[in-house]
Image: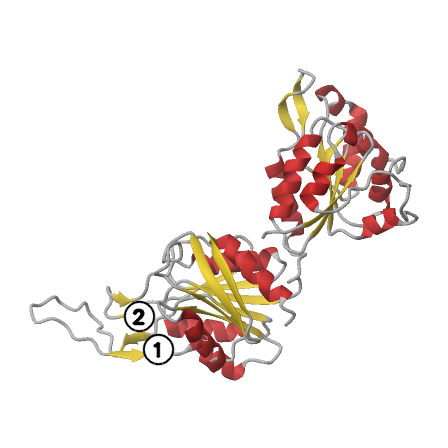
Amino acid sequence: MKLFNHKILLGVTGGIAAYKSAYLTRLLVKAGADVRVVMTEAAVKFIAPLTFESLTDHEVAVEMFPRNRFAATHHIILATWPDLIVVAPATADVIAQVANGLCPTLLSTILCATKKKILWAPSMNEGMYTNPAVQKNIETLRAMGHVIAEVGVGEMACKSYGPGRMAEPEEIFELIVAQLQGHGPLNGKKVVVTAGPCREALDPVRFISNRSSGKMGFALAVEAQRLGAETLLITGPTALSDPPGIEVVRVETTAQMAAAVEGGFAGADYLVMAAAPADFRPAETSPHKIKKNDKGLTVHLTPTIDILKKISAIRADSQVVVGFSLETENEVENAKKKLQEKRLDYIVVNNPLEEGAGFDTDTNRVTMVSKSGHILTIDKANKDVIAGKIWEYILADGLR
């Protein structure tokens, strides 16, 4: 749900690439965006408004003054509603209109009236695209702060070859995601996420740990960043690379993780404890490698610090704390008990014995329990999808 809670206005103009805009719309909707479409009268010659209405569940706007509906200021409403406006395909004509402040259509009127960022995906014959006047208009839009998607080079519908093909829907989608990062429902919020296992040393070469890969925690941190949060990821040893744009603190032991969490939690709005700290550590750590022998080895284990219990003692009422619980039996009952004992707002529980929910997998299946007693089951999906659904639930729950 990369674009959960984002509002996008898609302008579709009269070019053959308009059919690709349906694919783009589908990508945006699947990513959680609320999409409204405005088409020019030329665009409806290439693709029916019903296509976009079916994909978005919203009426498509075409006319400046449509019959049988109030339309006096709907161009201003549409100009102020979105987080981002995307024009794909963008013909030479509509580019020229906006670059020169002309408003002959509903779409160009919206584009001239808006103060929101506009992303253009030009699409036209190579002769039109290389025309100095068209290039001048594109540069004018850039100077106005608009974003221009690079065109592709290839064969055109008219059988000519050269630059001017509209960027592919997947490319435009990634540009949209990049533009909206930092402008989501978590904008202005600080989020701390923990991930991965911890290691408790037995000697210089051996340690006690668990099979956590850190993938769930990393996915939750990336999703928080996409939703606009200032994100701190505190992770134990994993094979995962640092996510771009996210502050990462790497620790090894449970005590180190506890110290990092306590420091990061000060001033944070959300703490998501997706890590799997060690529950026990060796009571004594040998300074040298323990030699193998035929007598065996007895190791006395002592409990590690309980990070969530420590946080619950210092948290403010305004701070949201999300815990994770791994259970192999009586999952929900055990999770509810943990939620109450540690003063959590939410707890996410999963059973590694279930198919698709084990360690070191790209998928998960979880159950969320809120302090209000509401239970949400999220079926098997990739962990980035699970992360999106977890944040979607938290943000829609009304606590914040």
Question: Which one is in front, 95 or 330?
Answer: 330
Seen as rendered, the residue at the extreme top is: 159
Instruction: Estimate the x, y position of residue 116 in percent, counting from the top left.
Output: 78, 49
Residue at the image point whose x is 11% and y is 71% from the top: 296
The colour scheme of the drawn protein is secondary structure
Circle 1 SS class:
loop
The Cα–Cα distance between marks 1 and 2, rounded to whole angstroms, is 9 Å
Residue that appears at 50% across and 59% down: 378
Label 1: which residue?
304
Picture coordinates of residue 264, whole percent (x, y): 53, 71
Residue 374, image x, y percentages:
56, 71
Label 1: how many Cα within 10 Å (few below 14, some 14–19, many 20+): some
Identify residue type, mark 2: Glu
Q: Do we see residue 376 in this rendering?
A: yes
Can you tell which mark lies on residue 91?
none
Residue 230 visible here: no
Q: Looking at the image, is 254 positioned above or below residue 129? A: below
**Location of mark 2 (residue):** 200
Q: Is residue 296 left or right of residue 121?
A: left
Whether residues under marks 1 and 2 lie with C-beta atoms below 8 angstroms apart, the answer is: yes
Badge 2 marks a residue whose secondary structure is strand
Q: Is residue 72 rendered to the left or right of residue 361?
A: right
User: Which of marks 2 and 1 precedes in the sequence?
Assistant: 2
Viewer-side residue, 51 vs 191: 51
| Residue 270 screen position, x and y as percent | 57, 70
Q: Residue at x 64, y 64 (%)?
A: 396
Question: For the residue marked with disc 1, what is the amino acid?
Answer: Thr
Position of the C terminus by quadrant: bottom right
Q: Is residue 36 left or right of residue 394?
A: right
Mark 2 nearby-residue class (10 Å; few <14, some 14–19, many ≥20): many
